Image (spheres, helix red, strand yellow):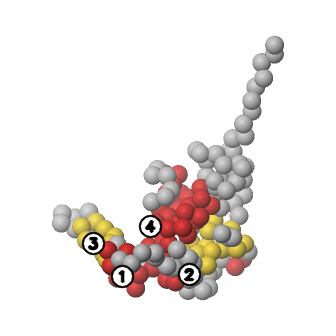
Amino acid sequence: MPQCKIRSYMAKKGDLTPAWYHVDATDQVLGRLAVKIATVLMGKHKPTYTPHVDTGDFVVVTNAQKFKVTGNNKVDQMSYERYSYYPGGKTVVPFKRMLERHPDRIIRESVRRMLPKNALGRHMLKKLKIYASDSHPHAAQQPEPLKF
């Protein structure tokens, strides 16, 4: 019997051109929003997904301060840690203060924790553009609305 070779498609670095997607974070649950964004950034929504190649797309998030958090006490109990790389430079920032000052960092941190923990994951995170307001400077890329 002849041997059959099964051929799988493996994307190469320059094969795919990334698309642009727009997400409105108004009344979206933070965790579920982050899962969808991370999936698109990694490229797992495409049939051409390859684990060792960045096959993902760009994501533009607007209205970053208008997302929701489920649960009664999450707003009071959640916190974010920072470290200044100096001795004793660890600080803990409560969720409420982070939401007031930097709502984009909350979404970025949620998505970052869902991406691969290597250089490829850091490259994927650079394709995430987050804005607290309703407008964004990426109109020339004609981002399509991302459906959930």
Kindly identify the residue that appears in the image at 41 percent across and 81 percent down: 99
Kindly identify the residue that appears in the image at 64 percent across and 55 percent down: 43
The residue to which callout 1 is attached is 96
Q: Name the kind of residue labelled 1 in the image.
A: Lys
Q: Name the kind of residue labelled 4 in the image.
A: Glu
Label 2, label 4: how far apart the Cα atoms are:
19 Å
The residue to which callout 3 is attached is 92
Query: Residue 143, percent across and down?
Result: 70, 73
Label 1, label 2: how far apart the Cα atoms are:
17 Å
User: Which of labels 2 and 4 is toward the front?
Assistant: 2
Of marks 2 and 4, which one's residue comes earlier in the chain? 2
The residue to which callout 4 is attached is 109
105, above or below 39, in the image: below
Of marks 1 and 4, which one's residue comes earlier in the chain? 1
Can residue 4 be seen? yes
User: Which of labels 1 and 4 is toward the front?
Assistant: 1
Query: Residue 138, percent across and down?
Result: 66, 77
Helix, strand or loop under label 2: loop
Helix, strand or loop under label 3: strand
Kindly identify the residue that appears in the image at 69 percent across and 70 percent down: 147
Can residue 132 be seen? no
Viewer-closest of 86 and 79 = 79
Label 1, label 4: how far apart the Cα atoms are:
15 Å
The residue to which callout 2 is attached is 27
Marks 2 and 4 close (CB-CB < 8 Å): no
Of marks 4 and 3, which one's residue comes earlier in the chain? 3
Q: Quadrant of the C terminus?
A: bottom right
Q: Name the kind of residue labelled 2 in the image.
A: Asp
Q: Quadrant of residue 63?
A: bottom right
Kindly identify the residue that appears in the image at 72 percent across and 40 percent down: 9
Q: Badge 3 local density, few (<14 within 10 Å), some, or many (20+)?
A: few
